[in-house]
Amino acid sequence: MSKGKATAAIVGPGNIGTDLMFKLIRRSDIIEPRYMVGVDPTSDGLARAKRLGLEVSAEGVDWLLAQDELPDIVFEATSAKAHSANAPRYAEAGILAVDLTPAAVGPYLCPPVNLSFNLDAPNVNMITCGGQATVPMVSAVSSVVPVPYAEIVASVSSRSAGPGTRANIDEFTETTSNAVEVVGGAERGKAIIILNPVEPPLMMRNTVFCAIPPEAGEPGELQDRLLESIHAMEATVQEYVPGYHLRAAPQFDPARDAWRGQARVFIPIEVKGRGDYLPDYAGNLDIITAAAARVGDLMVAHRLGVDTTWKSSADLGDLPDTTTMPQEAGV
Amino acid sequence: MGDMTIRPEDVPVVDREVTETEVLANATAAGGERDLRITDSTLRDGSHAMSHQFTEEQVRGVVSALDRAGVQVIEVTHGDGLGGSSFNYGFSLVDELDLIRAAVDEATQAKIAVLMLPGLATVRDLKQAHAVGASVARIATHCTEADVSTQHFGEARALGMETVGFLMLSHSTTPDVLARNARTMVDAGAECVYVVDSAGALILSDAQERITAVVEEVGRDGAQVGFHGHQNLSMGVANSVLAYQNGAVQVDGALCALGAGAGNSPTEVLAATFERMGIRTGINLGEVLSAAEEVVRPFIPRLPWMDRSSITQGYAGVYSSFLLHAERAAERYGVPAHEILQKVGEYGYVGGQEDMIIDIALELAQEKELGDLAGSGVR
């Protein structure tokens, strides 16, 4: 890491990897994407990266680690299995790893919640798209009142769920519900994902339900503090995912016996993608690539001892050539 | 079989009233040869109509009566399948694993089936259900998303469970696409694939075309085809008959129609109808009539019925279990339930998106407020 800049490799040239590449090129002044690595020589993603000036290879991580100049940071958007195999090799080579697969070799990371505790970690995991969208809100609630149970429902358009996600959908529910507990701060978490094929495609829509103490279910000072915390979190996430917003005001329901005497808050979140590479309905992909790029940027800035110069959307001009959504994607 | 319609000459001629004693005397004995297998879903789809408040005693009573009547498969789970107990779908009064265990304990010949929706339930839930004795795994996806179920069929087969695929909201796609998704399930390990009319929206030929397409696609591999009907447009039993005539060999019902929306095809009506047609279901009619009348009817708080809301569901193609959620949101936000359901249909929400009902209720409430302001002269 020299000259106040870090080089990055993206492993996995699919939709996620490509969107991430665009984000780093356009938004980061301290990370320079240098390598794009895949396993399929006919990959569109590799061809696109090459056109944009990256060094590309279909020879996988073996090729990457054989380069004279190794990257400072690697973003992995392959599969849990691949990352589990690659992670020790990155660590041995001293390369910081940001893991966008469900492998979770390193700690779960949600930028507005726990990045500051993990800045020195050698490997961090980006949970899932649904996790990035909902864990901030669970945390916003659990930082004000105890949350014995939180449940999230992520609805994504069928087009934005690729074959990897579909073949391993249990990984989504298990990883996300874990993160709702470990990072979100709920005692018990549950996650549900729904794929909806309707045309035109639906925007990513997430619901966060939290069980909260009865007094927080009634209007008053405690409920006001909860609302303040929720709105503050919305603004924080918007710093790196501009299309993240509450679709309606949080809804409070008074305590019920069926809820073990707890009250409930319902938080409806819509995520409109930034359209860096993927269409705007794919907010689920946008939020995980945006979070990963943000995390990479801040971790590199921390290592370089500089301030991040991350550009929010407001600073950016026109969109690049947005492409029609290829069928291969992942949540 | 092969006939596409019910011809007038097929309709049984009723020349005199038969007494209940005669029905019982002539009824097929439980078990034996069958042309068609009826799976009873009172204790799963009926869970929606009961707001997931089944007690162990009710489960034992229903299983015992169905088992005695010769019903071979009895489904017991939260209405939304394993793991359905939640804020979004409603919490179960009794843990479903306890209910499954009780059902297994009560059954002498019937197999106990469980429903699971990948994305909600996981393989871990399925293993737990299997560990307490469930032996049929019914794995459900939206009708165009069958590929999310691959790992679950594989695991269910590995556990030695019988496997059934459930293509939900089948009205919402074409017969071709439905057949392709059935193929995906069979390739993943489904032994039977159901055309599931979750919205009760299929009208006769719609059901027939879908069954035919699926039978053509998977029948040659020896996979069976089934039909799960709802009564929102009163088509459940008629569609089930057409399904059988077009090659389906499994059909779902629920006692007293106890199910989501306007309810399911009533098991007792299916049994009586098929018996009249000379199609063997292995179910003893007298016993199943008594199960409906004496065991289930007394504990039902509200019989499923075709009212404005549930008819709207059939008409607009809305997942039947949204009914009670829409009614609750209607009460909470002061907007009509049938208008909520109409919007659900327009927006194309699928099974599992119960949380969207709150969004729609808020949207309607806001429109209403603006309308009221306009009405009072505020501009």
Image (cartoon, coloured by chain):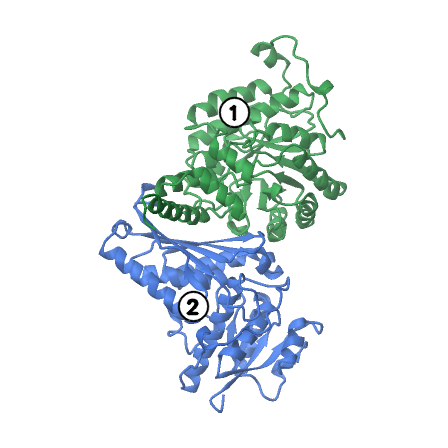
Q: Position of residue B37 (x, y in %)?
A: 64, 30
Number of residues whose C-alpha sits closer than 10 Å to that of mark 1, classed few (under 14), some (14–19) or many (20 or more): many
Please identify the residue farthest to the left as the structure is shown: A221
Q: Residue at x 52, y 25 (%)?
A: B65
In front of the other: B131 or B174: B174
Residue B65: image tag: 1
Residue type at mark 2: give it: Cys
**Tell me, what hue is chain A?**
blue
Secondary structure state at the residue bearing disc 2: loop
Q: Which chain is green?
A: B
Dot 1 falls on which chain?
A: B
Residue type at mark 1: give it: Ala
Number of residues whose C-alpha sits closer than 10 Å to that of mark 2, classed few (under 14), some (14–19) or many (20 or more): many
As measured in the structure, the alpha-carbon distance from the residue carrying label 1 to the one carrying label 2 is: 52 Å
**Where is mark 2, residue-wise?**
A110
Q: Position of residue A256 (x, y in %)?
A: 31, 43
Q: Residue at x 43, y 27 (%)?
A: B300
Secondary structure state at the residue bearing disc 1: helix
In front of the other: A14 or B235: B235
Dot 2 falls on which chain?
A: A
The answer to whether residue A192 shows anywhere in this view is yes
Quadrant assignment for the C terminus of chain A? bottom right
Q: Position of residue B168 (x, y in %)?
A: 59, 43
